[in-house]
Amino acid sequence: MSTVAPHRRTLWEEGRHAGHLVVLAAALLVLAVVLLDLAIFDGLSVAFDIAFVLVCVAAALGVRPRDFFTVGVLPPLLMAGTVAVLALLSRGAVADPADGLLQALVSGLAHHAGALVVGYGLTLLLLAVRQVALRHAGTIRAAAARQRVSR
């Protein structure tokens, strides 16, 4: 009779969704937040920044391991795409309405650079931690995995 307990998946091993589905879900969530933010505040607010970071974290935790690259490049592309669409359709939401398209794009990215840096940093950190955990049977430290196996 074996004394080794069955392996329970940890938070780091839970993500099982295809990369393209995670990207689609992230884009739809950001779109919903943008529409809500525009309806309430007539521009992107701190609520958008917080939601953007949360969407990035959820994407990093929800994607399957073979699609880590897809989510790893998502935050800057998602932010740039969001700001570009707003610069085209509602310039005043991301910059001064009199600004040109390129200036509105740069202004929008500059105004939300903090959210981009935090979201991108957390995404890369979570993907790295998940990669290490997958190599060590769900734990972050190799020593803990070896102790569990030896018991």
Image (spheres, rainbow, N blue to C red):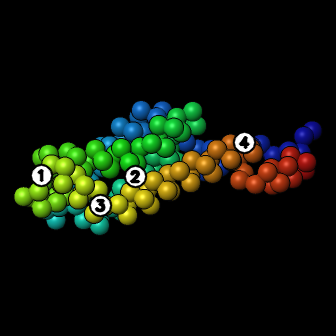
Q: Residues within 10 Å of mark 3 (few under 14, many from 20)?
A: few
Q: Amino acid at mark 2?
A: Val
Closer to the eye: label 2 or 1: 1
Task: Judge left or right: residue 127 versus residue 19.
Answer: right
Label 4 – label 3 distance at C-alpha:
38 Å
Residue shown at the point (38%, 57%) measured from the top left: 116
Task: Judge left or right: residue 42 versus residue 115.
Answer: left
Name the residue carrying label 1: 100
- The circle drawn on residue 55 is 2
Name the residue carrying label 4: 135
Under tag 3, what secondary structure?
A: helix
Name the residue carrying label 3: 110
Q: Position of residue 75 (x, y in %)?
A: 40, 48
Closer to the eye: label 1 or 4: 1
Residue shown at the point (48%, 32%) measured from the top left: 18
Q: Against 49, is 21 above or below?
A: above
Label 4 – label 2 distance at C-alpha:
25 Å
Front in this rendered view, residue 83 or 99: 99
Closer to the eye: label 4 or 3: 3
